Image (spheres, grey):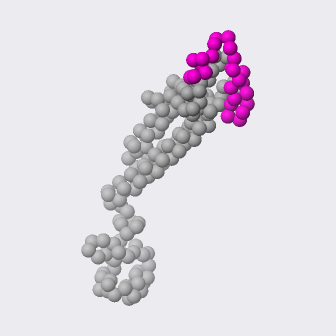
Amino acid sequence: MFYIEKEEKIILFDEDKQKLQDTIAFMPQYKGLKIFETERPIVNFEFADTTEYIEKQLNDAKKQKLLENAQKRDERLNVGVYYKNILFDSDVDQKTNLQFIAATLGDDETIVWNGKNNEPLECTKADILALGAEIAKLTMAIWGQGGLNLTYINAINSAQTIEELEAVNIEYPMEINEESGAENE
């Protein structure tokens, strides 16, 4: 790699020395500057092997990985939960509605509760509480102490290299085990 620097900053670089010489001929402000040769990688006008460059790349990659985690986490929460083979919302409104219904529904009463795809389920108070428990289980497996979200955040933040960071495989499974936050077998 060939490069030209001015005031200790790389201003031009190329793998072809002749291209740099030709460029200088049309740029009088760089006339007289020496063309250096190096084996060091250059990216975005910086040596890509400095501690500062490597740390910046790692920090930028961590930010992207944290965004990926947030996106996948929110997508999984938005999918919902299954109860009696029907998919139900698991959002805040659903939780609030279930709490209200559970508080007002008598033990011997039933109510028709619709799933995400408008599939009706005749529910007793026990069903409403069990559905709420499934949503709570999902929420805790993702957001709770030792949940998947925190596990991924800790793995991302503790990565010391890009390779370690790339090894963090973010997956929020449909089936979640409430004790460990891991996928049910």
Spot occupied by residue 118 in the image (x, y as percentages of width and height): 72, 33
Residue at image point 56% right, 36% down: 77
Residue 182 appears in the figure: no
| Residue furthest to the front | 104
Residue at image point 33% right, 72% down: 10
Spot occupied by residue 27 in the image (x, y as percentages of width and height): 37, 85
Spot occupied by residue 99 in the image (x, y as percentages of width and height): 56, 22
Is residue 109 part of the magenta span, yes or no? yes
Q: Is residue 79 above or below residue 68?
A: above
Spot occupied by residue 3 in the image (x, y as percentages of width and height): 36, 75
Q: Quadrant of residue 57?
A: bottom left
Query: For this rendering, which residue is in front, 35 or 82?
Result: 82
Query: For this rendering, which residue is in front, 20 or 79?
Result: 79
Q: Is residue 184 above or below residue 4?
A: above
| Residue furthest to the top | 108
Residue at image point 73% right, 30% down: 119
Query: For this rendering, which residue is in front, 169 or 139?
Result: 139
Query: For this rendering, which residue is in front, 96 or 56?
Result: 96
Q: Is residue 22 above or below residue 8?
A: below
Residue 143 appears in the figure: yes
User: The C terminus lies in which quarter of the figure?
Assistant: top right
Residue at image point 65% right, 19% down: 127
Q: Quadrant of residue 52?
A: bottom left
In the image, is 168 to the left or to the right of 97? left
> Start and end of the magenta stretch?
99-123
